[in-house]
Image: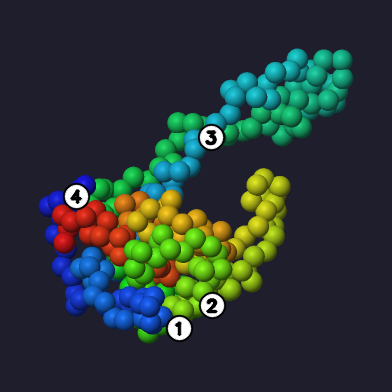
Amino acid sequence: MRFATGLKLYASNQAIGLLYNPEEKKLEEKELPELFSYPVRKDLIKRVYYSEFTAKLQPKGRDPLAGKRTSAESWGAHHGVSRVPRIKGTSRAAFVNMTVGGHLAHPPRVEKIIHERVNRKEKILGTISALSATATPELVKARGHLFSTERLPVIIPSSLEDEIGKIKDAVNLLQDIGLYSDIEKSSSSIRIRAGKGKRRGRRYKERKSILFVLSSTNKPLAKAVRNLPGVDVATGWTVNVLQLAPGAVPGRLTVYSEGALEQLKERFGGVI
């Protein structure tokens, strides 16, 4: 699945991450794949983010006859009232856009193009840039994430994806690798949304926290962490800029599994 063949990039120095050793419960330095060493292009990340965001939006339109199904007709001039259409037998105005129940002046149309398309190679570059930003502690800290490690990202062995299946074990893992404080920050940020959205299935708002990039979303670890405040789960094949750079701001606090890193290397194999 090397869809990036023919695209040449130039990496900087080798990026270094931290690999968690579950036996000694400590972090050890580990070289990251080359794609984590490419420069962070915030302009490309922003373009790709809006392209992926608008691709999810559903076109919305109006019934052409909405607000026009009425018997209202204008009385004409010389009646001492305005000439707007009025319902027969009453003086109540209808049909026109400034009346109650009238049609909209300029309703949304399904023909409107809302998807901002982006070139294929730009999308690849933007995704790689967003991945590279997760290995830059300065950008992660600038996003407001809390962590106590010297380097980022944190990598966990693939064996832990099957061994950890409970939230309490996942919490202990995050405490060992020094990232649980970010979960607590996201939990304390939960609040009720202002406006009508609170009765449309999105009552609460919370800050984004850790992104787990694992080899599969059906692993026990994925099911254990997905309900923690602000946490998202993705795989190396599906992770995108919407998850890596929420709000088009790069540098999300991310945890990778060794299996997911292999998927990323295979996914972007034509680039590196």
Ranked by sequence position, the earlier of labels 2 and 3 is 3
- 74 vs 270, left or right, is right
Cα separation, mark 3 vs mark 1, equals 46 Å
Cα separation, mark 1 vs mark 2, equals 9 Å
Residue 163 appears in the rendering:
yes
**Label 4 environment density (alpha carbons within 10 Å; few <14, some 14–19, many ≥20):** few
How far across and down, in percent of the image, does residue 111 sit? Answer: 45, 31
Disc on res. 60 = 3
- Quarter of the image with the C terminus is bottom left
Query: Is disc 3 placed on a helix, strand or loop?
Result: loop
Cα separation, mark 4 vs mark 2, equals 37 Å
Mark 1, residue position: 148
Mark 4, residue position: 2
Q: Is mark 1 in CB contact (under 8 Å) with mark 2?
A: yes
Ranked by sequence position, the earlier of labels 4 and 3 is 4
Of circles 2 and 3, which is in front? 2
**Label 2 environment density (alpha carbons within 10 Å; few <14, some 14–19, many ≥20):** some
**Hey, what amino acid is under mark 3?**
Lys
Ranked by sequence position, the earlier of labels 4 and 2 is 4
Ranked by sequence position, the earlier of labels 3 and 1 is 3
The residue that appears at 47% across and 67% down in the rendered structure is 210
